[in-house]
Amino acid sequence: MASYNPFRDVERIADALLSDPLRGPRQMPMDLYRDGDHYLLTADLPGMDPGSVDIDVDGQLLTIRAERTLPEAEHVKWITRERTAGSFLRQLSLGQGIDTERISASYDNGVLCVTIPVSERAKPRKVEVRSTSTAGATSTIQASGSSPAQLENSSS
């Protein structure tokens, strides 16, 4: 048997007053990691129609948009409604070492997976070092450097 909780009503009223469905795009939770010569971005988009997911690359800016619509039911008295409908948006600034032409994406079981490859010229490579001495010996060293690409997260 459910008991009356006045705080639940206050919380529901406060949520209704403070949440504005027209406030703009919402964020989607995501993970981003590097695995060898590519980055993997996974984003939770449960209940989204895959046709509503849109991924754009403009220069070094990757934008993911998705839309969730909830069915409208007439003559229904909602007990609780926590799932939000509307636009979801995430933007990432890609580093210079990304091959933007080969970015690919898939959507399965409510999870969007975006593969972001590192460009060939940004991958670690060997650089030959030649001796200027008369002995003419040559040796090879590993080129050093920080991460070939940096991904900066920026939310809208």
Image: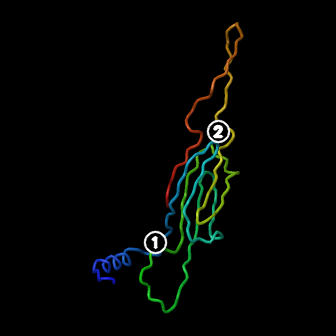
* Residue 32 drawn above or below residue 74: above
- Judging from the image, what secondary structure is the residue with disc 1 in? loop
The kind of residue on which mark 1 rests is Arg
Which residue type does callout 2 highlight? Ala
Q: Residue 143: where, in percent of width, then height?
A: 62, 28
- Residue 139, image quadrant: top right
Up the image or down, 13 lies above or below 124; here it is below
Q: Is residue 120 left or right of residue 21?
A: right
- C-alpha span from label 1 to label 2: 40 Å
Tell me the crowding category of disc 2: few under 14, some 14 to 19, or many 20 or more residues within 10 angstroms, Cα based. some
The image quadrant of residue 104 is bottom right
Residue 133 locus on image (x, y percent): 67, 9
Which residue occupies the foreground of this view, 133 or 14? Answer: 14
Q: Is residue 144 depicted above or below 25 in this figure?
A: above
Q: Foreground: 124 or 75?
A: 75
Name the N-terminal-most of marks 1 and 2: 1
The residue labelled by disc 2 is 122
Q: How many marks?
A: 2
> How far across and down, in percent of the image, does residue 56 sit?
64, 60
Mark 1 residue crowding within 10 angstroms, few (<14) / some (14–19) / many (20+): few
Q: Position of residue 92 (x, y in %)?
A: 55, 54
Residue at which label 1 appears: 23
* Callout 2 secondary element: helix
Residue at the farthest front position: 1
- Identify the residue shown where x is 33% and y is 84%: 1
Q: Residue at x 59, y 59 (%)?
A: 63
Q: At 46% from the left edge and 75% from the top edge, which residue is drawn?
A: 21
**Left or right of 8 in this view: 70:** right
Q: Which mark is residue 39?
A: none
